[in-house]
Image (spheres, helix red, strand yellow):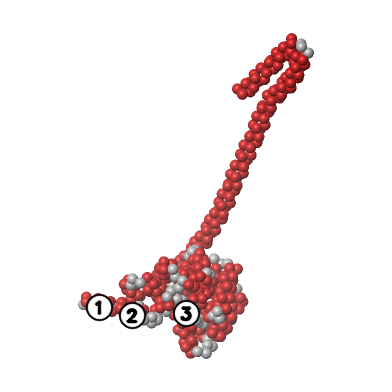
Amino acid sequence: MYLKKVLTIFALICSVHILFAQITPIRPEQRTIDSLKQALFTTTNDTLRLVLTNELRYNYFKVNTNFDSTLIYSRQVFALAHRLGYKIDEAYALDMIGDILNFQHNENTLETFFKGVKIAEDPQIENKILPRKYLELMTYWTPYFTSLLKKNNWSHHYFRLAILGSLYQDLGHAYGKVMPNRQRLFFYMSKAYELYKSQKDTLDWALTYENIAEYFYSSNQLDSSLCYAQKADTLRRIYNKGDSNYWKNKRKSVMRNTNPLLAAIYFKKGNDSLALHLVRQAIQKESENDQWWNWLSYFILAEYFCKNSIIDSSLYYATKAHKLAIDINSQDNLQKTSALLAKLYKKTGVSDSALMYYEKALALSNSLNDANKKAQLQRQRKKANKVLQQKNIEIEHALQELKATQAQLIQQEKMASLGELTAGIAHEIQNPLNFVNNFSEVNIELIDEMQQALQSGNAEEAFSISNDLKDNEQKIIIMVNVQMQS
């Protein structure tokens, strides 16, 4: 029994390695998480580890809807890509991390997206990409994206712009959710829109319009929301008119049906009949829709039937919406369905269930409010720290200027003191010089008189003048000695 188990594991590992070696694309739904973990455990190829880690991330996100595990493996993808120097995959991993943080109302959402944008905006990273044989095995946003890469001849330029566009779009979406800022939302959505338009990427072009429509819907600006939802719907119809059955099949599970969003807008605007018509159309294509859109369809029907006092039908769809909210791990949607179920059970007189859902709705509301407050406080703290850092820089700069000015003043004082000292010394030097000059002039006159006396034969007069000369010289010598001693 033990030998059979070992052989089974060995065969599974070998099959994974063979499939990767043959570069045969394997979709995540064809593998189990256990087999991926086993392959990840056995491989010594770091690039293959990156691919397998990303497949685990995809499975936890799309198949199992486990956001905590998705975040863990997304961070591992980033760490591997960073260590191996695959910059495009670094930017992609940051986009995936930011998505989960945004969903969780995390305060680090914007910072994460900005890091990804900084990387993806650099054209130089187009040379830092996975080798082709591994690139073909990667599942990025959806398996369909690999088909797009193939259609574009695995263009590194196309790949980089696709990731940059996604980062712009997700950053704009974050400004509509984590930190409501209409100006920045439109700034980044416009950048994504222009990029997708230049790439003729109708799918993501439509998704950009949908995100803007969702923002206006959540802020109750219904006319603006309807305008962008209709633009998205027009692009969706253009997109679905592809003339290739191959591409139609590839797109089938990718292009979201905008009918639930349109229905939600019309329902809020009071056009119940059109809203009901659009929702029923959406439910007919339930298997092709995004899970969030399916939740919205059920929730609209639940609200419609509640509004019209058809409680059984409202309970039915509210319960389906609640279950789907649990499946997709959406706290926002779970809070809304819990509140509606509490209201419905209260109307039917089932007080225990009404109380249970009321408490759940209240707890979720408090949790979401706490998360939003925490994110807001964190942003305010970061902003305050940034202002404080700037003030510290300004104070340090002012202090340096003050020190420089102080040193300059000290230097000026030193120079002034030196000038005064020099002047004093010059004055002191000038006094004995004047004294010497005066006596020198007198002595010259005395010598002239002495010479005249000698010529006239008056020796006595000449002798007297010589004594005066001697006295003057002695006075000069005394003065010089006194100045030298002082």
Q: Are marks 1 and 3 in contact (CB under 8 Å)?
A: no
Furthest residue toward top = 460
> Which quadrant would the N terminus be assigned to in this image?
bottom left
The CA span between labels 1 and 2 is: 16 Å
Instruction: Please report whichever mark, 1 or 2, sits nearer to the chain's N-terminal start.
Output: 1
Instruction: Please report whichever mark, 2 or 3, sits nearer to the chain's N-terminal start.
Output: 2
Q: Kindly identify which numbered label has been placed on residue 154.
A: 3
Instruction: Please report whichever mark, 1 or 3, sits nearer to the chain's N-terminal start.
Output: 1
Q: Nearer the viewer, residue 69 or 421?
A: 421
Q: Decide: is 262 above or below 398.
A: below
Asked if one can make out residue 430 in the rendered structure from this viewpoint, the answer is: yes
**Amino acid at circle 3:** Trp
SS state under label 1: helix
Judge the density around disc 1: few (<14), some (14-19), many (≥20) Cα neighbours within 10 Å.
Answer: few
Q: Position of residue 369 (x, y in %)?
A: 50, 64
The residue indicated by pointer 2 is 18
Q: Kindly identify which numbered label has been placed on residue 7.
A: 1
The CA span between labels 1 and 3 is: 38 Å
User: Between tags 1 and 3, which lies in front?
Assistant: 3
**Amino acid at circle 2:** Ile
For image coordinates 30% across by 78% down, the residue present is 14
The CA span between labels 2 and 3 is: 23 Å
User: Between tags 1 and 2, which lies in front?
Assistant: 2
Asked if one can make out residue 275 in the rendered structure from this viewpoint, the answer is: no
Q: Position of residue 103 (x, y in %)?
A: 48, 70
For image coordinates 59% across by 73% down, the residue present is 190
- Horizontal side of residue 352 vs 240, given as left or right: left
For image coordinates 36% across by 79% down, the residue present is 20
Q: Nearer the viewer, residue 148 or 212?
A: 148
**Amino acid at circle 1:** Leu
- Horizontal side of residue 317 vs 462, given as left or right: left
